[in-house]
Amino acid sequence: MSTPVIPVTAGTPGDELPGAAVLGKISYRIPITYAVLALAALLGLVGTMIGREGVWSQETEFQSRYGDQWFTIPNFSVPSMLTVIVLTVVLIAAAVYGYLLTRDRRTAPLWLHIVVGLAFVLAFLTWAGAGKTSVIPVTSLLAGALALSVPLIFGAMSGVICERSGIINIAIEGQLLFGAFAAAVVASLLTAPYLGLIAAPIAGGLVGALLAWFAVSYQVNQIIIGVVLNTLVLGLTSFFFSTLLADNASTWNARQPLGVIEIPLLSQIPILGPVLFRQTILVYLMYVTVIVLQIMLFRSRWGLRTRAVGEHPKAADTVGIHVNKRRVWNTILGGAVAGLGGAFFTVGSGLAFGREMSAGNGFIALAAMILGKWNPTGALVAALLFGFSKNLGNVLGTIGSPMPSQLLAMLPYVITIFAVAGLVGRVRAPAAEGIPYTK
Amino acid sequence: MKLELRGITKTFGPLVANDHIDLVVEPGEIHALLGENGAGKSTLMNVLYGLYDPDGGQILLEDRPVTFDGPGDAVRAGIGMVHQHFMLVPVFTVAESVALGYEPAGPGGILDLQAARRKVEEISERFGFHVDPDALIEELPVGVQQRVEIIKALSRDAKVLILDEPTAVLTPQETDELIKIMGELQDAGTSIVFITHKLREVRAIADRITVIRRGKVVGEASPESTETELASLMVGRSVSLAVDKTPAEVHDNSLVVSDLTVLNGSTPVVDHVSFTVQGGEILAIAGVQGNGQTELAEVILGIDEAAAGSITLDGKELLGLTVRQRLRAGIGFVPEDRSTDGVVSSFSIAENLVLDLYDTEPFAKGVSMYPARVAENAEVRTQEFDVRLTDIQDPISTLSGGNAQKVVLAREMSRPLRLLVASQPTRGLDVGSIEFVHKRIVAERDHGTPVLIVSTELDEVLALADRVAVMYRGRIIGIVDAREAGPAGINRDVLGLMMAGVPLEDAVQQAASHQSTLAGADALADGKDLT
Amino acid sequence: MTESNTPAPESTPEQPASSPTADRGEDPRSGSAILRQIVGGDVVISILAIIIALVIGAVLIAFADEDVADSISYVFARPSDFLGSAWSAVSDAYIALFRGAIFDFQADTFNRAVRPITESMTFATPLILAGLGIAVGFRAGLFNIGAQGQIIVGAIVAAYLGFAFDLPPVLHVLLCVLGGALGGALWGFIPGILKARTGANEVIVTIMLNWIAVYLVAYVLTLGKFNASGTGLRSPQIGPNAGYPSLIPDFLVPGNTFRLHWGFVVAILATVFVWWLLERSTIGFEIRAAGANPHAARTAGMSVGRITVLTMVIAGTLAGLAATSQVLVDGGSLTAGVAATYGFDAITVALLGRSKPLGTFIAGLLFGAFQAGGTLMQSVTSTPIDIVFVVQSVIVLLIAAPPLVRAIFRLPDPDASPKKVRATTKEAAA
């Protein structure tokens, strides 16, 4: 189909010209990443377990119970040493298999990534919980991971919406923070947490509107505006926190938690049920946001036009799409989505507002979006990965592990660097991102 | 549909791009808008298409004045445009590209891609386009992309179709196809505005010709006018269309490329290419854009990596050397895309003139630079190369395309060269600058330097080359001696067929039995010139 | 970074290139033209931006003040009460800001009166140094958010060298400064090499390294030598010869207790160095070329990867120097909060300074003054120092959008209005 139509017989030079097929260089990025993980497991095994007294008799206990459920899987224990050895062997095998695949110019299948990830995490958990009296709470580990991921996911979706239409949104952090602030204050003043959920996207959208205004009307560098808006929101919220909110907390900053809504049946599924379906409305909104965005972005008129505006604004303009108008509205929408995510810090978690509450989540969300290659589902996975590794550090820190808690806390950040440098590398951003459109 | 422009004026700051332009296009007419690069043709059409707001003047359709707030209005009024730089989103499919802006959609704005596909197939079938609605734009050859653009315009029932430099990316045979399509559209009652700076085409295609120079209409011409007449009308003085050059005197020094392969992922983009350029000759690489010429030039400089083969300059292997080492070995490189690769637009003219020499004597010692010497150098170079400027410390973005290209040339020729590689050396330039650039390139050849030219313009290839190598899908289809070029032996049609992948001998045969429209018009006009 | 790339119109005919001013149909040296340049120019825009930002700050101060809140309930009955209380709240705050930042006219001794300006310079020192690091990155097209982490790692090294060794004067402080710079350089090297080798986005990597540094310093503080006190909160104090000497000697201003030290001189030297680097050295030429157009830089034979690494190392070094101004002071030690928010404020400083060395220096001084003044303001009035963030960010936003500032004050646009003049003369001619 792709050959131009020519009224004469086109030649097929491939047949008569000599020359052996030349093959390109092979990138060993993936097997190297696998090997590093296998090596880490091996070192952990050798370094801390072998030679320790009674190591063979140590056990690691896992727990999946979490709240009331119709039926629960009882706690179970595994022999620590043996499990880690088996899992390490799996990792080494995966690294070798990955190497062989890559050498033969085949791509590693998705299931291999999943196997490697699971094996490493399980090995790590087993190692950390070896010989401890405390159990590894699997379900609450996952529940906590989801909780830590919610604002990240909202933030990353905000990034996807804005950047797909060509506006770089560094202000996710500010939008989250302002959303958290607005949700807390409105919910507290009106003693209605659900009204806080309405205020949060408005606040986030306001920050988005400022971003769009300066980016489109004055063509200020979008990274500059983003950074400055973050400072502005931080300054404003901290100012009001120190004055109004601190002086009169019972009126301005009372805790107003959203109620947990349990979905019948689904919440009874072992392990995942309570994690996914015993949540506040905000979490359900997050599921809806991701699914709807994924569909709309690639299957709808809005998505087609949005992507056109982000990839080739002039082409969009020539078919009558108002590039700047669309960018402005999408940036406001993106801000609103992040603002909604910010509500999770306050009403979503049943907490009062605190200074600098977003704590860098906006930037992590940005990283998740890039890791997810500007796709809603990709960003979702990246955000969950981050939330999981963060909570892994938290949980291990509380049950006690052979590794100092500060080093455990580095885990999610180290993993992200790994993912960016090792697995993703150069990514393709929307082509017109960050470039103001003028005719 | 009848289209009339009255007194259209458009200025950009101090620059008057269109100065009271009048133009009438009758229904079902193919009207050529002829003018050299930068004459204001594209600006005029962008005004007509609603992309630019005119500062003055009126647009009339069927004698009724209309105003366009944006391209949407123009499209609704029945105007379609195929831009010189295609307005297609590379990551979209053909169906998505055609649908964009006028999407068939169901409830909730969910796209009806099936309907979009059918539309593409329907139009594609009607005109014999053979376009796959599910192909990704970025994977299509430019000729097919152009068809997608035409489908886009037709799917919106365009009554006036503007084609901006449509033949720039086509082989002569593909141009024939386009001419045929234009004929069919004309029969269907569509008016066509055909923008070009190529004299041969307008004579073969147009019903009427309007010539624009420096933003003004300077006259109308009939297709029967000679090329010389049209050229002097277009440029404002008589121009010699041929480049003066003596036969090549070949020396021993040479660039030898053998079995060179470059990969993009795992697909070869330069595929076992071998050729030699001797000192004192110009070898031109001809071919349709995107057949590996860009990569060939870049691998010689070292920007792209070779997967196999060798490149030797005067017996010394270049592969494995860095770009800097190759530049210091005496390569002069004029990149294909001046604004992306040739200059740093925010840098001053003086800085751009030392962009690859800034760390050598006399401009620097150690890490210390001497701005005064950089400036001094700029004064000398810009005079030698006749760069028209106000101040050498102004950013180079203040220069016109022709003057910026002279800066690149001045820089690359300011050191003793052992090889000159120039890609599309005159793309987008006006006739005066083209003449100047061609003269300098020939001078470098006469100096005894091997010169490699990459050009998609057959006119340029035929004007400059001593030998021509035609590239198709990464391979060299054949190398011909330009001295044999002429109506009898190797001509445009033969080169054009080779550009479409037909090996040399077959091409000669086919061309003899199947003269292209343009070549026919040439013969006709040549005959007229004689009488 | 603020100039947008407005593409030139597609057709640029071979018009005789002439100076933009010559085309404007009026003598650029005439009185009105000069006035327009000054009024519309950068300096005036900057001053007006500061004024707007202070007005916005004033509104916030008044809004949060209790007296104002009380008086607003009867604002229609007695508006003078409302205005009076608003005025006193705002003026009290801003007078305190001035007294804390520049000159304390209420002080009883000369030393106390001039101390504020030295405080501003002290606060400015790390902002200038880290800001320069960010600015160098910007010029190379790198968005280095990692100054925070680079400061922390620099501080760890500098502090360690400061308390673990005991060396003669001068030598010891030099060693510590060098160590701090190296620590920062290392933390800058990581994102640089990752970007050059694997293409990893430097924004992500520097953000992650900031967090890693935060946990690293917390961890280091629990280790043997660092944790002599056993609390895990503070390292031992640096040795007596490891700190920067006081900049203003006692014989010049007798009995002074100024905190201002030789770190400020390091900041001045760094500013000059960065200017030389960017404008007068081949490295700077490469940095600027790679930042403005990496494709052209590569075609011209520069190694963009090498430039990326080098730039990040230089940026890290400057941030590491910023760390020394915090740690290498009299009685200084390493704490988890050693970097405060200097690494992030430095981004704003570099943006305000338009990534130019002198601009960054001045912006650093301005922000240092806000910091010093804000501290006093917070302690003597009820206005929290957070207002300073608001004022700072509004300033940067406005300076980045001159047309907005001009619109607020209805100022002429120095670029646009001559065009109008030209159009009308043209009309008259036609």
Image (cartoon, coloured by chain):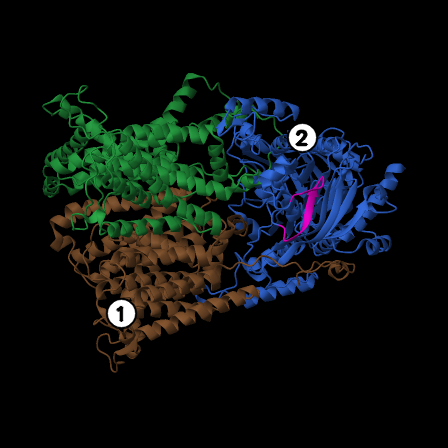
Chain whose colour in the figure is blue: B
Q: Position of residue A335 (x, y in %)?
A: 34, 53
Q: Nearer the viewer, residue C370 or B196?
A: C370
* Residue pointed to by mark 1: A129
* Residue B311 belongs to magenta span: yes
From the top left corner, tell me how far across and down residue C66 is, in percent.
Answer: 11, 42
Which of the 4 quarters of the picture holds residue C74? top left
Tell me if A65 is positioned left or right of A375 in this view. left
Give the colour in which the image draws chain A: brown
Of all chains, the one bearing label 1 is: A
Q: Is any part of residue C396 visible from this angle?
A: no
User: Magenta residues: mostly which secondary structure?
Assistant: strand
Tell me the residue at 40%/37% (across/down).
C136
Mark 2 is on which residue type?
Pro
Residue lying farthest right?
Answer: B531
On the rendered image, what quadrant is the N terminus of chain C found in? top left
In x, y percent, where is residue A194? 23, 62
Q: Quadrant of residue B331?
A: top right
Above or below, B125 against B168 in this view is below
Q: Which residues are magenta?
A: B306-318
State which quadrant residue B473 falls in: bottom right
Up/down of C152 relative to A151, above or below: above
**In the rendered image, is residue B523 in sight?**
yes
**Residue C75: percent from left, percent from top:** 12, 40
Q: Look at the image and give the colour of chain C.
A: green
Whether the magenta-drawn stretch holds residue B269 is answered as: no
Q: Residues within 10 Å of mark 1 (few under 14, many from 20)?
A: many
Pointer 2 residue: B416
The number of callouts visible is 2
Most foreground residue, A43 or A112 = A43
Tell me whether marks 2 and 1 sit on the same chain: no
